[in-house]
Amino acid sequence: MEGDPPAGHDDALHPVRHLRRALSGVTAPPAGGRIPPEVPPPPVTPHAPPRRGRTRLRLTAGVALTLAVSAAWSAATLHGEQPAPPTSIASQVPADAIGNLRMFSQSTGWAERQSDGAILHTTRGVLRWTVASPPTLETVIAVSYVDVRTARALTVPASAQGATTVESWATGDGGATWNREGSFSVVGFSPTLIGTLDFVDPLHGWFSQLQDDPGVTGTELYRTTDGGADWTQIAFVGTGGPAGAAPSTQAPTGCVALIAAFVSPGTGWLSGSCSTGPPPLYVSHDGGLSWADQPLAPVPGSLYGEQSSPPSFTSTEDGTLITEDVGATPVSAGLFATTDGGRTWSLRHSSAGTPFGSDFVDTDHGWLAISSPESGATAPDLDVTGDGGRSWSVLHALPDIGWNVYMGLQLDFLTPAVGWVSTGVDQSDGGRSYLLETGDGGQTWSALRPLISMQ
């Protein structure tokens, strides 16, 4: 039922759920634009502080979720008073449903079309997009946004299954032109378990390929140091696969959905899901060739396993990650923060509920979207912080459009005031999807209808 909150052991909340749906059959409404908010937002700063692009996983038959966060504090919020949620919102699918959104300014950014995964670019804001995919009939399986004009992408044949050749592509002009850089072979490619691509600069990138084949369950990790011309498999994490390719500290039994996220050419982390024990976190300082366990305390191990998100950094020193205990009743979430480049992590926030997404735009301002334990709620709460997660306030601000739509929630905030929420496509209810915008730190939201055109 739409009014029911997500269950702790629902397949839709599988550990590998930070992923993009490639869904078809989305019906678009007539062309349009913004649905005006009921309260006009205040003026905002037009430029965001610099920050690294976030890692996004994708599961074609699964649920989309990305971690993102930002916050703006009003005097009322700081004193525990909550603004009234929007009383109405359009119940139409946007003209073109988009996801995997990453805005670098209010006018420029990247996204993907939810119906087929086509890469999109804009220089005219979130309402106007241009298809900017590589010139190939193959399927885009992963993309990494390096900066406002630079991106890297991977493609495979439309019918790829099992042993597959992956093509690597590069653009430096916003997707207007692409170069085919190189290719590499993947032994256990699955169209339903794809993975994530992460570039920290135009040259250094990693691809985590998830597998779930008989006798081989885990993650193949590939690396390039020349922008995608040459790729090398540097590790296998899971059960089966090449001998001696697991982390130097062996991953616990059942850790079969770990993915890599890097902050520099040398330093990165493995995070994901384990069937038992504490949330996994491994660190590498040699580009992924070797790994060491970095326990997250004080989270206890769970009989049903715990999940960890890829860390997201706003500077070389400051970052956050989310954990989830799927065995707890109700499901519980934790937000960890580091101020020393990931050498140590401290628990800044814990709450009952399923985490949908989080992001910090700077050291202090952040949001955590989390399912509300309140009966009848059909939208996540927004837990907001303005002091780096040491104290929080709750905004009941997102419109009640149904859990099935929010299962694909992605947050992308540009400043402590300006941000967006893109939702998944709810196939069970007419293919609904939303792009929401706030100009006041998440206290009020308006629905947008983006339009996509060909180059």
Image (cartoon, rainbow, N blue to C red):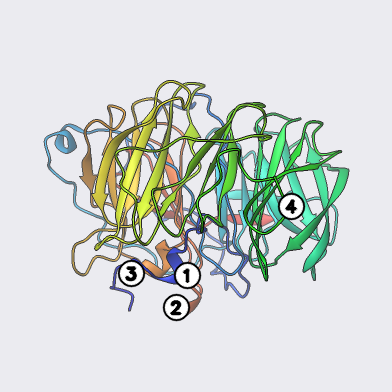
Q: Quadrant of the N terminus?
A: bottom left
To which quarter of the image does residue 229 belong?
top right
Foreground disc of the pair 4, 2: 4
Q: Residue at x 38, y 30 (%)?
A: 345
The image position of residue 53, as x and y in percent, is: 58, 36
Q: Which residue is mark 3?
A: 7
Q: Secondary structure at mark 4?
A: loop
Q: Which residue is mark 1?
A: 432
Q: CA distance from mark 3 to mark 2?
A: 19 Å
SS at circle 1: loop
User: In the image, residue 294 lies at what x, y percent?
Assistant: 46, 35
Q: Which residue is mark 2?
A: 429
Tell me which label, 1 or 3, sits earlier in the chain. Answer: 3
- In whole angstroms, how far apart are the C-alphas of marks 1 and 3? 21 Å
Disc ID at residue 101: none
Q: In the shown orientation, is residue 319 left or right of residue 256?
A: left
- Residue flagged by tag 3: what amino acid is it? Ala
Q: Position of residue 94 (x, y in %)?
A: 51, 63
Which of the two discs, 3 and 2, labels the residue nearer the N terminus?
3
